[in-house]
Image: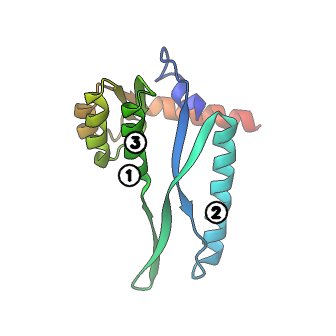
Amino acid sequence: MNALFANPLKGLSVSTKIFFGAKLHFNKETPVKSAELISMQRKLINKINKQGYEFINAGNVRAQKVGNTVIFKEKGVDVRIAVDMVAMACDKKVKTIILCSSDSDLQPAVAEARKRKVEVIYLGFENSPNKGLSYTTNRTILIRNSEVRDACIEEKEKKK
């Protein structure tokens, strides 16, 4: 992840890195898929922790049966991000927040943080930027497709 953000965030000082994720739950109707996803999440958490990120379990992923298909839905992550953004702004714990999410539901939290003189930077992807967040935040930085490709190539080279 650090490789992906290095160029877009060049010149910015980042002191705290938080990754918000949803807790996966074992589903007895999809035991193989559940075990695979839980294992992948453990690996992700270990990897981001090694890169200096704090992982916060901010919600849950629950299975829902729709007809004969089991689908998984994440709930609560956006609410936790919003609460933490506003709390940090109110407590004057931050001067700048770099928000790497394209969830429009975060716009009210962005507005509240900005009211408290916190600069909010929207970090998104050029192939699918969120226009609402671009308008609500102080500044927008879009990660170019070529930067995503280069970060993936760099990660593959490290594994060799």
Q: Is residue 59 above or below residue 141?
A: below
Q: Quadrant of residue 85?
A: top left
> Could you tell which of marks 3 and 2 lies nearer the N-terminus?
2
- Closer to us: mark 1 or mark 2? 1
Question: Marks 3 and 1, Cα distance to the nearest angstrom?
Answer: 12 Å
Relative image position of residue 120 (x, y in whole percent): 35, 28
**Disc 1 on helix, strand or loop?**
helix
Relative image position of residue 149 (x, y in whole percent): 53, 34
Q: Quadrant of residue 140?
A: top left
Q: Quadrant of residue 42?
A: bottom right
Relative image position of residue 73 (x, y in whole percent): 43, 66
Looking at the rendered structure, the kind of residue marked 1 is: Val
Q: Is residue 85 above or below residue 57?
A: above
Q: Residue furthest front?
A: 91
> Could you tell which of marks 1 and 2 lies nearer the N-terminus?
2
Q: Name the mark on residue 105.
A: none
Numbered label tally:
3
Looking at the rendered structure, the kind of residue marked 3 is: Ser
Residue 112 makes an appearance in the image: yes
Relative image position of residue 72 (x, y in whole percent): 47, 69
Residue at x-position 41% and y-position 22% = 95
Q: Is residue 136 above or below residue 96?
A: below
Q: Name the mark on residue 38.
A: 2
Residue at image mark 1: 79
Question: Marks 1 and 2, Cα distance to the nearest angstrom?
Answer: 22 Å
Q: Name the mark on residue 101.
A: 3
Q: Residues within 10 Å of mark 3 (few under 14, many from 20)?
A: some
Image quadrant occupied by the C terminus: top right
